[in-house]
Amino acid sequence: MRLIFLGTGTSQGVPIIGCNCQVCKSTDPKDKRLRSSVLICSDETKILVDAGPDFRCQMLRTETSKLDAILITHEHYDHVGGMDDVRGINYAMRRSVNVYTEKRVIEAIKTNLSYAFGATPYPGTPKLELVDHEMKQFHVNGTLIEPIRVMHGKLPISGYVIENEIVYITDASFIPTETIKRICGCKILVINALRRTEHMSHFSLNQALEIISEVAPEKAYLTHFCHEIGLHDDVQKELPENVFLSYDGLSVTI
Ligand SMILES: [Zn+2]
Ligand SMILES: [Zn+2]
Ligand SMILES: [Zn+2]
């Protein structure tokens, strides 16, 4: 399996429009961050986690024209804002795409894309089969997926465990004890770290590092950064041996 980081930025992305800080002005490609999303690929199967407003660009950059499923963590725009562009995948595959998430998020997607749902959808709109995973395990082409509960401020959202090896958690600010127990000792943990200072609905860098030492994965990758995190190369030097600052285009083979 391969885990490819398509985007590693928070809701505004990096650089931020109009910002002249050293991170936003950096010429290092590792400091340019689209909205957070990952692609999990095996020989047969491609699974995307989140389809934010940079979805189209991310599909083009990776020459992806086939998706077996999209897993959605929650309904914020930076995670679902690209759903209209799933049309391109529909056309290339000549079929609809299954989108797995929880009930509240399904309702939000239907509201956002009201023209694509209902009795008479507008012609040419995306064909999305919205599936309520009910926080229970399911398979996509034989790949085992398990939703796990994490909290984003007061909002309960979904993280995902893929094939019992990769854990993907974004936008969390609290992880319940049962979830910690479930993911303890996993192979790869992806977890969000917004910036150095604390935030009400996102882990800071130190909070994410605390979770990593509790979970003790083989390797951990941080994601969903804002520009305040600092320059990629500087921050990477401060991290423990098995912890990596992800960047757009990073590909990890498992
Ligand atoms: Zn987000
Ligand atoms: Zn900036
Ligand atoms: Zn969010």
Image (spheres, grey):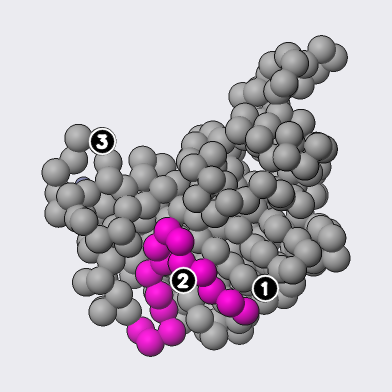
Give neighbour class at mark 3: few <14, some 14-19, many 20+ (Cα, 10 Å). few
The residue indicated by pointer 3 is 17
Q: Which residues are magenta?
A: 240-254
Mark 3 residue element:
loop
Instruction: Tell which of 66 and 20 is nearer to you.
Output: 66
Give neighbour class at mark 2: few <14, some 14-19, many 20+ (Cα, 10 Å). many
> What type is the residue that disc 2 sits on?
Tyr
Residue under the point 43% across and 84% down: 242
The residue indicated by pointer 2 is 221
Mark 2 or mark 1: whose residue is earlier in sequence: 1
Q: Is residue 75 visible?
A: yes
Mark 1 residue element:
loop
Residue 251 colored in magenta in the image:
yes
Would residue 27 be found to the left or right of residue 14 on screen? Answer: left
Q: Determine whether 11 is above or below 180 in the image.
A: above
Query: Rounded to the nearest whole Å, what is the CA distance between mark 2 and mark 1?
Result: 16 Å
Q: Are marks 3 and 1 in contact (CB under 8 Å)?
A: no
Would residue 195 be found to the left or right of residue 125 on screen? Answer: left
The residue indicated by pointer 1 is 1
Residue 214: give its label.
Answer: none
